[in-house]
Image: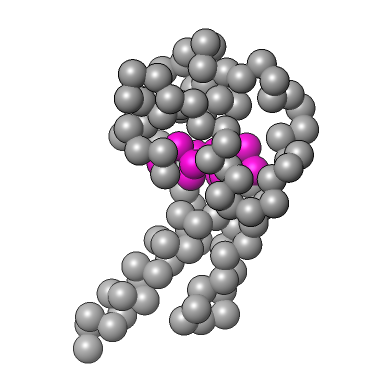
Amino acid sequence: EESYDDYGQYDQSYDSTMMDPNIAGDNNKDVYCPNDLYRFISKRNGINYCSICGKFNHQTATCVRNHIESRHFPGRFHYPCNQCEKVFDTNTKLNNHKQKHRHEVNRY
C-alpha cells in the first residue's frame, strides 16, 4: 500500500504567523484542480509555508503543495496511473507508484 506519511526529513516547526486568518473550516472552497493548492502557500525569507496550519515548511513550493494535498485535502483529486489500472488520491502516491513501474522495466 502506498503512503505519504513521512515528513520527518523536513523542518516542521510551528509558526502561527504563517497561518492565513482568512482560511477557515471549509478549505474545499474554490479548489477545483491540483494547481489551486498553491494558493495555500505563504513565503517568507525564501521558505515556503503551509498557510492553512502553519506547521509545515520547505524550500520548495512543491513539497508544501504535497503536504497541503495529503493533510488538508485528502482524496480531493484522483490520479490514474497511465501504465496500469490503479488510481491514487495524491500526486505523490502516483509518483511513488510510477517508480515501481520504472524498476520493473529496469529488471529486464
Whole-percent x, y for residue 16 in the image: 53, 11
Above or below 17: residue 58 = below
Work out whether residue 53 or residue 3 is closer to the camera in this orientation and state it. 53
Above or below 44: residue 72 = below
Residue at the location (58% across, 52% down)?
34
Q: Is residue 71 visible?
A: no
Work out whether residue 97 or residue 64 is closer to the camera in this orientation and state it. 64
Work out whether residue 28 or residue 45 is closer to the camera in this orientation and state it. 45
Residue at the location (58% across, 42% down)?
37
Residue at the location (56% across, 49% down)?
35
Whole-percent x, y for residue 15 in the image: 47, 13
The residue positioned farthest toward the bottom in the image shown = 108
Quadrant location, the C terminus: bottom left
Whole-percent x, y for residue 64 in the image: 45, 37
Above or below 87: residue 77 = above
Determine the main secondary structure of the stretch shown in magenta: helix
Give the residues drawn in magenta, as a range. 63-73
Left or right, 88 with respect to 49, comes to right
Left or right, 5 with respect to 20, comes to left
Left or right, 9 with respect to 66, comes to left
Q: Answer whether residue 72 is magenta in the image.
A: yes
Whole-percent x, y for residue 67 in the image: 50, 39
Tell me which corner region of the image, top left, top right, bottom left or bottom right, holds residue 60.
Answer: top left
Q: Answer whether residue 22 is magenta in the image.
A: no
